[in-house]
Image (spheres, rainbow, N blue to C red):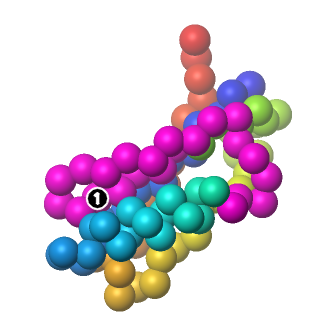
Amino acid sequence: MRVTLMWEARAVQDRGPELLEWARARARVLAREPLRREVFRAPQDRVLVLTWWEADALDAELPELPEPDAELITRPVHRWRFESVE
């Protein structure tokens, strides 16, 4: 089964570049290497990280990005897991 982890955060105003660099650095040093990883930015200082993994179940224990410092984000990080169906 292929599982995709989605991590999305919104930076405090004008700190989007800092959050982007924070997420890029953390995505490069996960406890193990994902099959694939991508980092995105969006309006309103949002940052999105997707990682793809081979796993036995959707709820398998997989390396995830942590929460950034509270001063860097406007709300808790949103996280979702997806199972590939193709």
Q: In the figure, is residue 53 to the left or right of 74?
A: right
Number of numbered labels in the structure image: 1
Q: Give SS at disc 1.
A: strand
Read off the residue under disc 1: 46
Question: Can residue 75 be seen at all in this image of the molecule?
Answer: no
Which residue is depicted at the point 58% across and 11% down? 86
Q: Tell whether 39 sits left or right of 44.
A: right
User: Is residue 9 located in the magenta-colored stretch of the structure?
Assistant: no
Q: Which residue is farthest bottom?
A: 71
Relative to 44, say whether 60 is above or below. Answer: above
Q: Residue at x 25, y 50 (%)?
A: 42
Residue at image point 40% right, 51% down? 48
| Residue 21 in which image quadrant | bottom left
How far from the left and from the top, in percent, is residue 75?
32, 74
Name the kind of residue labelled 1 in the image.
Answer: Arg
What residue range appears in magenta?
Answer: 29-50
Position of the N terminus, as image quadrant, is: top right
